[in-house]
Amino acid sequence: MADPITTDATTDEPVGLTRRGLLRGGAASALGLAISGSLGGLARAGGAAAAAKPRSGVGYGPLVPDPAGRLALPPRFSYTVVAETGVTRLESGEVSPDNYDGTAAFTRTGGGSILVANHEIRPPTPDNPNPIGVPHVAGVTYDEGVHGGTTTIEVDADGNRLTEYVSLAGSSTNCAGGRTPWNTWLTCEETFTPAGATKRHGYVFEVDPYDRSANEDPTPIVALGRFEHEAVAVDPDTGQIYETEDSTNPHGLLYRWTPPVDAPPLGKGVLRSLAPDAGALEAMQAYDSSGALVPDLCVATVIGTTYDVEWVTVPDRDPDGGPDSEFIRRQFNGTWDTVTYTDKPGGDITRSRKLEGAWWGDGGAYVVASFARVSDGSEVQHDGQVWFVDPLEDTITLKLLFAYTPDDQDSDPDGPDNISVSPYGGVILAEDGEGRQHLVGATAAGETFFLARNEVGDGGGELTGPTFSADKATLFTNLFTPGHVYAITGPWRRVGRE
């Protein structure tokens, strides 16, 4: 069991990043930690130990400021800029689009990696009146009225850019997604009715990193539901797909899709061929030890809190009706005002504010809740949670908690978003919070560290899409805006104590 760790902010190491973890037996025990810049809230909840002295050997060392003003990394680490919005060019001649987000890395024949990267392009706003959208390339454009999508980037074994091309266009607000066991990327639309759209949105699309022809005539996977998707995680044994919903008014839900028993084995292109009502789409209900329904995941304040889960059928997975049924999450009984849609968690379902990243690992699905505030209807405030859904035990367990620390925006992590499971143990989280933004590493033993820091501008732009190459030599990550894709190399190893 890991001892808690704090370090001095003057060394640019994490401050108060780690608290004593609670690990459960079996494969699901790979992560158990609490993160807080303030011991008070967690200590009162009984879920954290007192802070300890800094411990050497955790992580890769203090972050070194970047002379180029892009990305601070530990000593002996370096990066290559793989793509840059408005600077690098696509095969079709246009510049690389804005807003690189969720990404997956696949093995490239001949060495290197193939990246499929989301572009969370929203309709123009006063703050961003002219976003550089994904070009509408013939054959791979779903809706001519919107400009999100994905690009596919090939790099060599050293992370040097070889090419970048459009693999999906005409989708909107492509936020995160998930890699499939059959080596494709599921890209998620975090929107329902984008301005300018000429088709229905709020869907998941499949992108093949190897076969360009497989991406022609993009078809939404309606069976996975129509809502503000954030991310998905695919169970390689059952084909069940866990989906997060980043929504409010009311808070979003955690979904599970189960393939139909008479469907062909899931593989490339199968999902898009299924009927709109294929399989079962269900939403999660969580129950505490007394058997009471948990209305909102924010109420869990003790690491190791475990709820039993049940899954209830979604009444209409492809809604297009009145205001009470327009969104799936409104089809369940709730306590919100049906006129003003005042956001109040509740009803006969379990909700959460800001359900974000998801990643399959250790026999289950890691799911991130980015933050919760009383002002948005949450009962308890926090700066982030990581949950683990165990499909064999039918449970969901709190593995990580960021305490609410409004007075410490730079050295205390907050707002976790994208997540990936590291081949070196533990997980990697990308911040999308306040102050300077980091990649945060967490070892399997529950010790955490800063892995990278954004230094573009004031450092407040979010880092996204952390994903390792198949050979574990390169960590790819993105800066959302101004858009960058980085390939990070260095003396990777398993860090911390097991």
Image (tube, grey):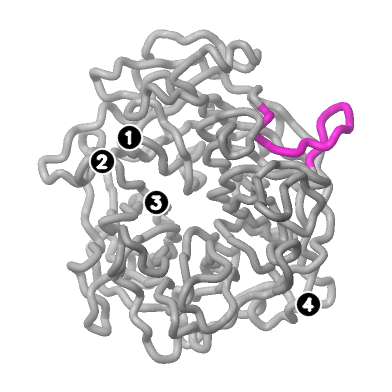
Left or right: residue 128 versus residue 417 is left
Residue 269 point in image, percent of width and height: 61, 80
The residue at the point 31 percent across, 58 percent down is 127
Segment colored magenta: 286-300
Residue 428 point in image, percent of width and height: 45, 41
Looking at the image, is mark 2 or mark 3 nearer the viewer?
A: 2
Inter-mark Cα distance, 2 to 4: 48 Å
The residue at which mark 1 appears reads as 435
Left or right: residue 215 versus residue 472 is right
The residue at the point 54 percent across, 49 percent down is 356
Is tag 1's residue or tag 2's residue first in the polypeptide sequence?
Answer: 1
Is tag 2's residue or tag 3's residue first in the polypeptide sequence?
Answer: 2
Residue 289 colored in magenta in the image: yes
Residue 156 colored in magenta in the image: no
The residue at which mark 3 appears reads as 464
Check if mark 1's residue and mark 3's residue have beta carbons within 8 Å.
no
Mark number displayed over residue 221 = none
Inter-mark Cα distance, 4 to 1: 48 Å
The residue at the point 68 percent across, 37 percent down is 297
The local secondary structure at tag 4 comes to loop
